[in-house]
Amino acid sequence: MSKKQEQEPEYKDFIEKKPQVVMKVNSRQMELLSEHILITQNLGKREQMTVKEIHELYWDEKEKKHGKTLKTIYRYMDLLEEQGIVQVAGHRKPKGSHLTEKLYSRKATVYFEEEAKPTKWWTEEEGIKQLETIWKVGKKYFGMEEEKMKDFANVIGSYFGEREIIILELLEMIEEDKELAEELKGISIMDFKSIFSMISMIKAYSKEGAVREKLDELI
């Protein structure tokens, strides 16, 4: 057998769809992303996979068997496709066979949780209780005066108002920067939220931010 024959691939992949860059997901999709994180994270790393390859993710070396049946994996993929989390990206044609296998990919490179319609939660009953607790700790730590409570609530409100704008700016930036999106693919949605929260907090409390001015006056 020649070296050329030895190196011939056992199959050929035909890719018809690529993931979109950023996709907002609802609460149901969030549940599925969390429940099937093994699948979605590996699809982020490997881009496209067949059901049989996904099935191998569930191989238990200690037990010497798969933790899920192939039938179960097919059911998972049907559900994830139906809910818009994965897509059929193309097909794989094994060498010397007329049969093909579906190739699945993530629907998006980066998933981002679609938050409920913003509300001034700190002005509502539960929010006021939460704010009072934060105030008790903050007042002691920063040595703030009791009459500063209203100003403290305003700082919180200003932060969340700016945070919403900053997150939209970050999403737009990632959609335009394909290289950055590639670097972010495969990370969990919770890690993604943590990154956004940290950056938005730094920006909101930066020297040029309106929140910083109010905070300086307060403490």
Image (cartoon, rainbow, N blue to C red):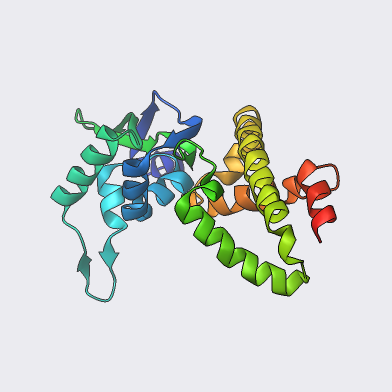
Q: Position of residue 35 (x, y in %)?
A: 31, 54
Towards the viewer: 164 or 88: 164
Q: Report the residue that reaches farthest toward the top.
A: 16
- Residue at screen point 76% across, 66% down: 145
Residue found farthest to the front: 147
Identify the residue at image location x=21%, y=64%. 67
Height in image: 158 above or below 34? above
Q: Front-most of 5 and 161? A: 161
Relative to 106, 219 lies left or right: right
| Residue 188 seen in render | no
- The image quadrant that residue 8 belongs to is top left
The image quadrant of residue 95 is top left
Which residue: 40% across, 33% down? 107
Q: Dividing the image into 4 quarters, which one contains the N terminus?
A: top left
Q: Give the tally of numbered discs.
A: 0
**Is any part of residue 2 visible from this angle?**
yes
The quadrant of the rendering that contains the C terminus is: bottom right
* Residue at the spot 68% in from the left edge and 58% down from the top edge: 149
| Left or right position of 109 against 162 | left
Side of 155 where 15 appears, left or right: left
Give the image location of residue 83, x and y in percent: 29, 35
Report the side of 62 relative to 105 (left or right). left
Q: Position of residue 31 (x, y in %)?
A: 33, 49
